[in-house]
Every structure is written in structure tokens, then in C-alpha cells.
Amino acid sequence: MRKLLTRWTSLFYVLFSVAQLAAQSSTQATLVKAGRLLDPRTGNVLSPAAVLIEDGKIKEVGPPSRLQSNAPAGVQIIDLGSATLLPGLIDSHTHLLIDVTVPPEAESARRWNGDYAPGQLLAIVESPSKRVLLGAQMAREDLESGFTTVRNLGHSGIDGDVALRDAINAHRVPGPRILGCGRKLITPGSYLQSLNPALAESIMRQEFFQIEGPDSARQAVRENLFYDVNVIKVTVDDDLTATEMTAIVEEAHREHVKVATHAVSVGAIQTAIDGGVDSIEHGNDVTDEQLKAMRDKGIFIDITPTFWGGFFKKIAEPTIVMSPAMKSELAASDDRRRQKVASFTQRVLKSGVKFAAGSDMSWFYPGKTRGQASATMFANLHDAGMPPLDILRAVTTNAAEMLGWQDRVGAVEPGKFADLVAVAGDPIADITELERVRFVMKDGQVVKNDLASH
């Protein structure tokens, strides 16, 4: 028995040692080399550049010669040639679980919020499983276009974005890191109106929490937190009271969860500011005084250039027949919007307020994947007068700070997740390079590589 025990003990130590060696040898190390590495925070360029990655995180950044000599034996080398390397892109305002098709002109004219409401209702009444699978497709397409992190702000059912987030984190489906908000908090009458009274409450609760008083507001936050959401999203219209807004923020902040607010009008924006929210989404009518107040309080403005650049005509014209009157109205609307957004963009830049940018994409864009549709925001921001470096910051370092993830994403720095993208040219010279991302890496794993390897 003693000999047998000794033999078993020896065998155990042998197997344990082999396991340790196997674990050590399985440590994944990758060296990514590129012609240039652009740091959005500073605007500095390292050329040539290399990034050493171990176990899904960035270990070192520097010249290829130094990093290659420091790399462990057997390191995998990915040579991107003359490409420009950047941090993974962040879309801080998107809607992955809805894909609205523009309805015919006559159908749209029959309903309140007629362009959006039919698609919204169809999404709500369809199977939640079907909806999450649609979201999985949209998430993969976003990732393939270089968006390695997104913040999903509603229109995803009770917990669809959270379920999708967890499936991606468990490597069941490919997609970006997701911060999900579950159901939006709204006041009665937002998004949908005049529903069948026998069904209205049931329909609305599949997508929203309707706020009617401070106690209702607090309860809505608590119910959403039950589903392990990352952020609370509230639509602030002029009928949401300051007391209700404050209750939402207090309840969310008690659990260390940020509050993102859809606010467009001057009154809604002021309610959000007074309530102490973390970010104001859209903010179209913001005044200079409000921008100053946001700057002083550290409140972000999340710019959403979705409908800039004639977007609605681009998504509608291939799928519906538009009357001459509709075409004329869209053209006039685009002209008015062009002037307004140029002024808006310059005021935001001059104010010193913290800003990020999100696509707000929830529309079917004929001929484009969801990721390609989301990437149209870069040209829209540039056409409105935002410099390329500020655009890059809005979807990397700035966005990471707004999300509270600046220690994880948004920059190519040691300790952060190895989320990288590369483009063939120089995005500072041509911001549309971001519409043509050629290389995508998330967690140190290559998602896409259309660049020649040497």
C-alpha cells in the first residue's frame, strides 16, 4: 500500500507539472505591427508601431524592433503593413434589436410618429427570441465595421440587449462589448399613442416603463436593475417633472449606474441638467448657457448625427415611392438641418463641454450592413464642421470616459483590452477611412483582416 501510495503521489506531481507547463505554453501572445499608430487623445503618431498582446490585453506599445525582441517565444506576429492602427471604435448610442423599414408615404401620414411607430409595434409584438437573433446579426455587423464597444439605449424589449450582451460575453455569438439599458423610462404618450385600450398597457410594458410620479420613477429603476442593466435610459419630454428626474438619478446613482437621457427641447434639457444626469443624448436645441452648465457639472453631450446629411432620403428612396411634394419637403428640411447642425457643432466645440458621438442607428439602410450604416455618422460629423481628430476622440477616448470604461477601452495602452482596428489610409486626412475598416481585433482575437500580411 505504501509503495502504491508513493507511486500515485509521484504520478500526481508529474501530471500537475505537465498541466502547469501546458497552461504556461497556452498563454496567448500576439504582436501586431503597423506602419502607424494614432493616439486620439493626443493626436500623436508612432511610426512604425507595434502592440504586444497577452491574454486578451495590451501588454506593451512601442517600436516593432523593441517589442519583437521582448516578445515571448512563439509569439504570433500580425503584420498590417503601412496601415494606421487605432483603438476599437465605440458607438455610444445605438439600437441593435430593432431595424425599422420606412413605411409607404400614405401609411406614415395616417399615424402619429408614422415613420417609426409601425416598425416599433412590429418589433414589440414579434417573438423576443426572434428579436434577439436579429440583434445578434446587427451586433456581428457592427463588430465587423470596427465597433468593438457599443451602448445600446433601448428599443430592445424587456431584457433583449442584456441577454445579447451576456451571450457575447460567453462567446456564444460574436459581437461588441455591450452596455445595455433594458427598457426605456418614458412619460405616457411617448413613441406610441392611441393604442387599443384593452392591449395598450401590455404592449407598452414590453418596451417601456411609463413614469407617473417620483415613486413610479424609483420603482422603474429598481425593476430595470433587476435585469442587471448597465445604464438607465430615460426619455425626457417637457412633461417629465424635475422631481421625477431627480428620483430616477438618485435611485440609479445609489447603485452606481449612470443615467443617459434623451432630451431635445430646451425645457427637457434643463430638466435633465437640474436632475444631475450623466449624459444628454441628442441635445439638439441646447443653449449656450446650458452647455456651460453641463461643462461645469461634467455632464456629457452625446451627439447623434443620424439624420444629418440627407439620411432619411437615402434610406427611403430605394424602398418607397415618394411624391414630388415629399421630395421637395425633404430637400428643404435637409437644407434647414445643414445650417442648424453646423451651428450646433461649433457651439459644442467652443463650449468646452465633454462630448461623445453615437449613431442612434435603428433603421434599415438598403445596401448597407448595420455596421456600415452606423459608420455614416463620421462623414456627417465632418460635414458639420467637426475636425477629424475630435471625431476620433468622440468615438474612442471621450466615449470610454462617458461610459465609465476609460480603464478598459478607448485607447491603445497597457492594461486595456486588446481592441484594435486598422484602416489603409490616414483618417485625419480622410475621415471616411473609418467607413472602410480593414482590420478588427477584439480581446486579442482577430475578427477581420483584409490587409495583406507579410
Image (cartoon, rainbow, N blue to C red):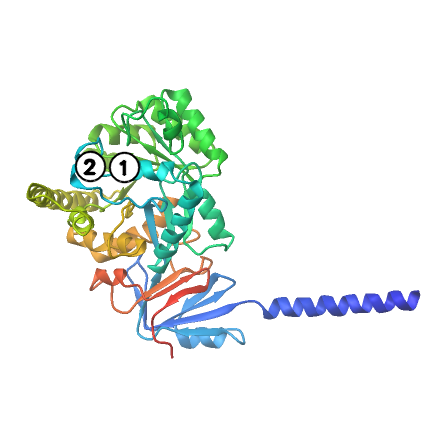
Q: Horizontal placement of 29 versus 440: left or right?
A: right
Q: Look at the image and tell me in which quarter the N terminus lies.
A: bottom right
As drawn, 10 above or below 402: below
Question: What is the spatial separation of the Cα atoms under label 2 and label 1, in whole angstroms?
Answer: 9 Å
Instruction: Please name the residue that numbered disc 2 is placed on.
Output: 107
Identify the residue shown where x is 53% and y is 73%. 72
* Circle 2 SS class: helix
As drawn, 322 above or below 51: above
**Quadrant of the image occupied by residue 52:** bottom left
For the residue pair 182 and 431, the one nearer the viewer reads as 182
Amino acid type of the residue tagged 1 in the rendering: Pro
Determine whether label 2 and label 1 are within 8 Å by CB. Answer: yes
Residue 405 visible in rendering: no
Of all residues, the one furthest to the bottom in this rendering is: 454
Q: Disc number at residue 118?
A: 1
Q: Horizontal placement of 86 versus 339: left or right?
A: right
Q: Position of residue 21 (x, y in %)?
A: 65, 70
Amino acid type of the residue tagged 2 in the rendering: Glu
**Quadrant of the image occupied by residue 296:** top left
Q: Position of residue 348 (x, y in %)?
A: 20, 43
Residue 258 visible in rendering: yes
Of all residues, the one furthest to the right in this rendering is: 1
